[in-house]
Amino acid sequence: MTIEMLREFGADIDEGLTRCMNNEQFYLRMVSMGLADERFETLGTALAEKNMDAAFEMAHALKGVLGNLALTPIYEPVSEMTELLRTKTDADYLSMYQEMKAQREKLLSM
């Protein structure tokens, strides 16, 4: 994975690098670690089990990770999901999860 690939993906590279002291190596390492976060799978399990409290906790944590890394195409659906879960709004969480997961897979395949 390269900075240019992340830029092509739609990540806000300038913001992500700023948060990582403009150190490209560090930023790329943090992106790899963020994409490997086990909470992606735990969130899917919580949603499938309709455990909205656990789903909120996982989505909220992922929102922080993805926001700090400025991975906008993955951050946006998880951010929307987090806010809906926070207010316990009835929504199609599984489709939001699928979008987030598809974006993550797209990035991982680059």
Image (cartoon, rainbow, N blue to C red):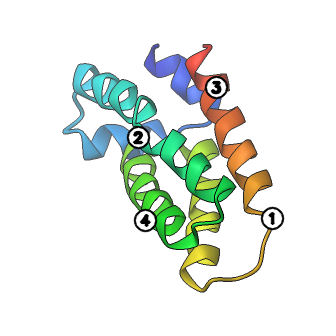
Q: Residue furthest front?
A: 49
Location of residue 87 in the rendering, given as x and y in whole percent from the top left corner: 59, 86
Mark 3 surroundings within 10 Å by alpha-carbon count, few (fewer than 14), some (14 through 19), many (20 or more): few
Q: Is residue 89 left or right of residue 46?
A: right
Q: Nearer the viewer, residue 98 or 9?
A: 98
Q: Is residue 9 left or right of residue 66?
A: right
Seen at 78% across and 72% down, the residue is 91
Amino acid identity at mark 3: Glu
Q: Does residue 18 sit above or below 25 in this rendering? A: below
Secondary structure beneath disc 1? Answer: loop
Residue highlighted by disc 2 = 14
Q: CA distance from mark 2 to mark 4?
A: 28 Å
Amino acid identity at mark 2: Asp
Residue highlighted by disc 3 = 105
* Foreground label between 3 and 2: 3
Residue highlighted by disc 4 = 57
Q: Does residue 65 sit above or below 84 in this rendering? A: above
Seen at 38% across and 30% down, the residue is 31
Mark 2 surroundings within 10 Å by alpha-carbon count, few (fewer than 14), some (14 through 19), many (20 or more): few
Q: CA distance from mark 4 to mark 3?
A: 22 Å
Amino acid identity at mark 1: Asp
Can you tell which quarter of the image residue 20 is in? top left
Location of residue 10 in the rendering, given as x and y in whole percent from the top left corner: 62, 36
Mark 4 surroundings within 10 Å by alpha-carbon count, few (fewer than 14), some (14 through 19), many (20 or more): some
Can you tell which quarter of the image residue 26 is in? top left
Q: Earlier in the sequence, mark 4 or mark 3?
A: 4
Q: CA distance from mark 3 to mark 2?
A: 22 Å
Secondary structure beneath disc 3? Answer: helix
Seen at 44% across and 52% down, the residue is 62
Q: How many marks?
A: 4
